[in-house]
């Protein structure tokens, strides 16, 4: 069963990476007016970190599998820049969203977390 899940993740890693990138873009730019706000003391930063960890994990998995030809360092820089661009777009093209430097920090932490998770899983998998 574990091998089946591994094969499924490997086959679809690039698709999940692209889909999660698109979903983050859309959710970052659409109006959230009318959506209940349950945020307390910047807890949305955890949402940012989780979303970027998820996205970067699958981009880096795709890289590791040879589906894209970039180094992890290049991917980390690109994904962090992606988050910065989204924050700039929130400030410049939306009226109901604002860019936030702390969101950029949370996004960047998420990218690093995605890398760390991939490395840990790789280490655990190789030891089994």
Image: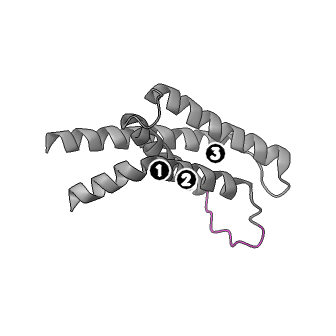
3 or 2: mark nearer the eye: 2
Whichever of labels 3 and 2 marks the residue nearer the N terminus, that label is: 2
- Measuring from the top left, give residue 64's x and y in whole percent: 37, 35
Q: Nearer the viewer, residue 84 or 102?
A: 84
Residue of label 1: 54
Please state the extent of the stretch shown in magenta in the rendering: 33-41
Q: Is the magenta stretch mostly helix, strand or loop?
A: loop
- Measuring from the top left, give residue 97's x and y in whole percent: 78, 54
Of helix, strand and loop, which one carries label 2? Answer: helix
Residue at 84%, 48% in the rendered image? 93
Whichever of labels 3 and 1 marks the residue nearer the N terminus, that label is: 1
The quadrant of the picture occupied by the C terminus is: top left
Asked if 78 appears above or below 27 in the picture, the reply is above
Q: Is residue 42 visible?
A: no
Residue of label 3: 103
Question: Badge 3: few (under 14), some or many (20 or more) residues near its Cα, within 10 Å?
Answer: many
C-alpha distance separating marks 3 and 1: 16 Å
């Amino acid at each position: 069963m574990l091998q089946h899940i591994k094969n499924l993740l490997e086959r679809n890693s690039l698709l999940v990476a692209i889909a999660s990138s698109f979903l983050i873009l859309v959710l970052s730019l659409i109006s959230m007016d009318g959506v209940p706000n349950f945020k307390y003391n910047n807890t949305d930063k955890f949402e940012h970190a989780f979303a970027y960890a998820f996205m970067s994990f699958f981009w880096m998995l795709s890289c590791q599998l040879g589906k894209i030809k970039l180094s992890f360092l290049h991917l980390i820089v690109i994904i962090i820049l992606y988050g910065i661009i989204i924050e700039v777009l929130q400030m410049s093209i939306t009226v109901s969203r604002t860019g936030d430097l702390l969101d950029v920090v949370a996004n960047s932490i998420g990218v690093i977390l995605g890398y760390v998770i991939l490395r840990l899983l790789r280490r655990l998998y190789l030891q089994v």
